[in-house]
Amino acid sequence: MSRQERAAWLFAGPVLAAIAAMLVLPVALALLLGLTDYSIYALADLKNLRFVGLANFTELLATPLFWRALGNTALFAALGVPMAIGASLAAALLLHDATVRWKPLWRVALFAPYVTSVVATAIVWRFVLNTRFGLLNSALGAAGIGPVDWLGDPRASIPAILLFVTWKIFGYNMIVFTAALSAVPGELMEAARLDGASRWGRFRHVTLPAIGPTLLLAAVMSVAGFLQLFAEPYVMTMGGPAQSTVTVLYFMFDEGFRWWNLGQASATALILFVLILGVTAVQARIGRRYQWL
Amino acid sequence: MCDLPPCPDGPFRQPALIALDRRTMLGGAAALTLTACARARESGALRFWATGYEGDYSPHLMVPFTAATGIEVETQSVPSTAAHEKFLTAFAGGVLPDVFMLPSGWVGEFAMIGAVAPVPSPALVADTLPAARAIAQVGGRDYAVPWAIAPQVQFYRRDLLGAAGYDAPPTDWAGWLRMGSALKGRRPGEFVFLALLNWPDTLFSMLYQAGATLLRDRDTRGNFRTDEAREAFAFYKSLFDEGLAPKVLSTEVQDPYAAFAQGRFAVWPSWPTLLLDLHRRAAELPRERWGVARLAGPNGPGPATMVANSLCVASTCERPAEAWALVRHLSSAASELRFQSLIGNLPARASAWDAPQMADPVLAPFAEQMRQPAIAPPVVEWERIQNEVQLVAERMVRGGLSIDEALAAIDTRIDRILAKRRALVEAGRIA
């Protein structure tokens, strides 16, 4: 080993050791746990622990609630990612406009929900979404739309939570997009305008390619985030009504920490991991096709 | 009382929406809280956890204890909706407090996993109401000292019932329904009963009243496809079908007390601790406008759900003598009576019932109901089974399932939950 190599290992060593101890090892252990029937009986006496192979996975696939949780999560991601990114991009574009005044103030105001506690904001939103006295239903009522039982109707609960999540998180990507927008070359924009490109044309052919990589990053992060949705349904609805807002992570939490079926919870975690990996790989492929990566 | 921040909940509750930077922030926050916890442990105070009003108000009981013994007690009030996982995680992580309060159904579970120490002296549980003591026993051995006993009863709006011609709610189901229709007829925009769709207590009271035996085969299988269970489910469903009870979850009702005071519903099956709200917020609902009665049963009052909170000492506690001294103090007749006047909780000590304050006529229905307790099957999965039953019942109420489909679905779910227990019973490893 050359001196340089030794120095490199010396610097990287502690980090690698930390990663191995805190990331690789627990993941490997969780994988092993997923092959056992670790339950509350095993917590009482380890002799009750059995190695069950893939039984946890076959049992999961036969559990209706797991499929329901998977479906709910897919719905959250499919609707939530475009909603959140669309809101972020729209807000960033509005703020980027030269005619907007007091930009820092707007930025802070729109970013504030992101850094506020989930629990506190969820409680406020529970009031906003209240069927009888809620602000949202009052506004809808003024527009002539009858009251919606946002958190009590199994069909309205997912949109209600999506509304809250979007409001909560769009500020972060808005800041990211604002940074990306400021890097769009002004002379290109100018040239496009002189050539007679419309507003939409300038956005489609100048802005979008320039912020493409940022958009991809935001999409990857948002998808991973939505697939791991937990705190919002936990605080707002506790998975209800009629388990219509149980997500995969919520299901895993319930199985693992509430009922202490760690074997099955680990198996769920593994499935979720594979899912996120798969979706991210697809996104990366799309990104490469448009030469954003 | 100690003003340190609470120790972090075991599981990681925040979603990693934007994983990187949030994790960094949380890491910093966690480190801060950890140092605070370590400080609390070094200070030499006994740690005590309780849920609900018991947790909120127990510091009042600690003052005389600290004055008499010089032992500081650090109380933490744990939210009841997250208590089960918090206690289990604390046990797995080896950070259970010295003394903690367990609701009735959990004693067996925590005794089985070895989290609680058996009661060292019979003197600690002498003079306890038999129903409360039975709930705190596992296999004939005392694992907890009963602290309070809470039978489910109905609180009703005297004025609203009176306007419909009732002095008190009828004690049988048919009469209850008739009264419900009469009240609904007078005020169609409001409801009559409050039975939250994610709280199983009321449904289980109905099951016990109907005389259902909920498990079979040495408590290893569900037994819901019976006439008794069908009767209870049909009655439960009819409350919602006829618009007498709102189809709401606890997360939707921000302030049930205010709703009761405003007359949004007139009958509220609830617990003695509601007396605290009724007392504290008497300005919203004066004393003469409400009353208490036993829950209606199919043919008159019967056994109903009963919660008996018990005090346990952790098996890992390093100062058992001091911990048991605290339990003795908290469960003394004097402390229990003090708690009764503070939060409405009913004493589990038999002799405390002779005190003059217990002669208040408001407490009479509780005392009567207490003599007819319903004891849940002693399986460690009971908490989960109750949850699953309620989830299926919710789907039934919302029209997703018929009564028979719901009962069949419940048996399937219970059989699945009890699969591990069944295997262990068949192998002779547990009774």
Image: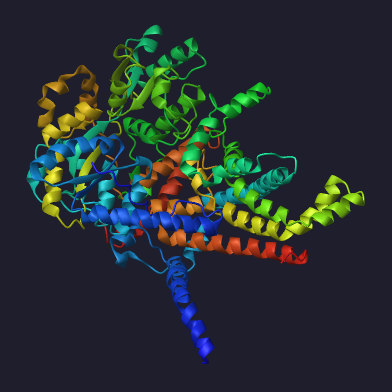
Along the horizontal axis of the image, is A194 left or right of B124?
A: right
Q: Is residue A22 above or below residue B187?
A: below
Q: Position of residue A168 (x, y in %)?
A: 57, 43
- Residue B293 x %, y %: 29, 20
In front of the other: B221 or A178:
A178
Q: Quadrant of the C terminus of chain A?
A: bottom right
- Which image quadrant for residue A185? bottom right
Determine if residue A148 is in view. Answer: no
Q: Residue at x 29, y 34 (%)?
A: B53
Q: Residue at x 88, y 54 (%)?
A: A191
At x 46% / y 36%, what residue is drawn?
B393
Whether residue B187 sits left or right of residue B290 in the image: it is right
Residue B97 location (% of width, % of height): 24, 51
Q: Is residue B145 above or below residue B98?
A: above
Taking the spot 71% from the left edge, 44% from the top edge, the residue there is A90
**Scheme of colours in the image:** rainbow
Look at the picture and state if B239 lies above or below B77: above
Q: Nearer the viewer, residue B323 or A246?
A: B323
**Which residue lies most toward the right here?**
A195
Q: Quadrant of residue A227?
A: bottom right
